[in-house]
């Protein structure tokens, strides 16, 4: 599982002109990609990493300060553009694998008391954010 985690002051996801997920205070915007072999272990590791990363001001985590997280599915994190001009997406898991994994990460965060806003899996989303920093980190499950 791969995630791009950005510290933000606010962020929102819009689908067909309607805001479907938003955070309006400092927190994290997470783009989450899933590969074929991701399972329960990767879900638990990724949710724990998002929860405990000390990326917020004064080296705090979202768990420390009760900050929200906006999670957006992002299969293109497993895109590969090293050859030719057209990227390949073969490392990205199909929807029947990636959607349950995405939901499981969001559910695990919520279970741990984190406020989670979500995009709509598979939708054509427009993501807007106001970065705080800039602070952006790439994390990948072992």
Image: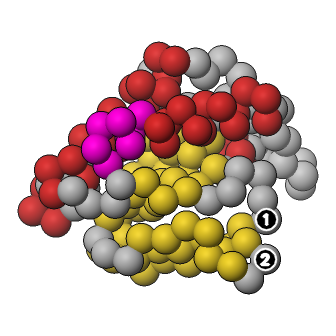
Q: What separation in Å lies between label 2 and label 1 (alpha carbons)?
A: 8 Å
- Residue 107 placement (x, y as % from top left): 47, 38
Q: Position of residue 97 (x, y in %)?
A: 73, 27
Q: Please tell me whether residue 80 is drawn above or below residue 118 in the rendered image.
A: above
Front-lying residue, 74 or 108: 108
Q: Which residue is mark 1?
A: 124
Magenta-drawn stretch contains 57: no
* Element under disc 2: loop
The residue under the point 75% across, 42% down is 80
Question: Mark number for residue 16?
Answer: 2
Q: Please determine whether, in this image, residue 10 is positioned above or below residue 137.
A: below
Local crowd at mark 2 within 10 Å, few (<14), some, or many (≥20)?
Answer: few
Residue 7 is left or right of residue 119, and the answer is left
To which quarter of the image does residue 28 belong?
bottom left
Q: Quadrant of residue 10?
A: bottom left
Left or right, residue 57 beside residue 92: left
Q: Which residues are magenta?
A: 108-114
Percent x, y of residue 81: 78, 47
């Amino acid at each position: 599982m791969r995630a791009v985690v950005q510290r933000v002051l606010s962020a929102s996801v819009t689908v067909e002109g309607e805001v479907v997920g938003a955070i309006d205070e400092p927190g994290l915007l997470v783009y989450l990609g899933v590969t074929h072999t991701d399972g329960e272990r990767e879900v638990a590791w990724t949710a724990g990493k998002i929860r405990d990363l000390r990326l917020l001001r004064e080296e705090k985590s979202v768990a420390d300060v009760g900050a929200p997280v906006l999670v957006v599915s992002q299969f293109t994190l497993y895109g590969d553009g090293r050859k030719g001009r057209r990227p390949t997406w073969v490392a990205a898991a199909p929807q029947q694998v990636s959607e349950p994994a995405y939901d499981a990460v969001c559910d695990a965060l919520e279970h741990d008391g984190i406020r989670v806003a979500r995009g709509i899996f598979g939708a054509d989303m427009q993501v807007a954010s106001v970065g705080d920093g800039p602070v952006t980190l790439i994390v990948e499950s072992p």
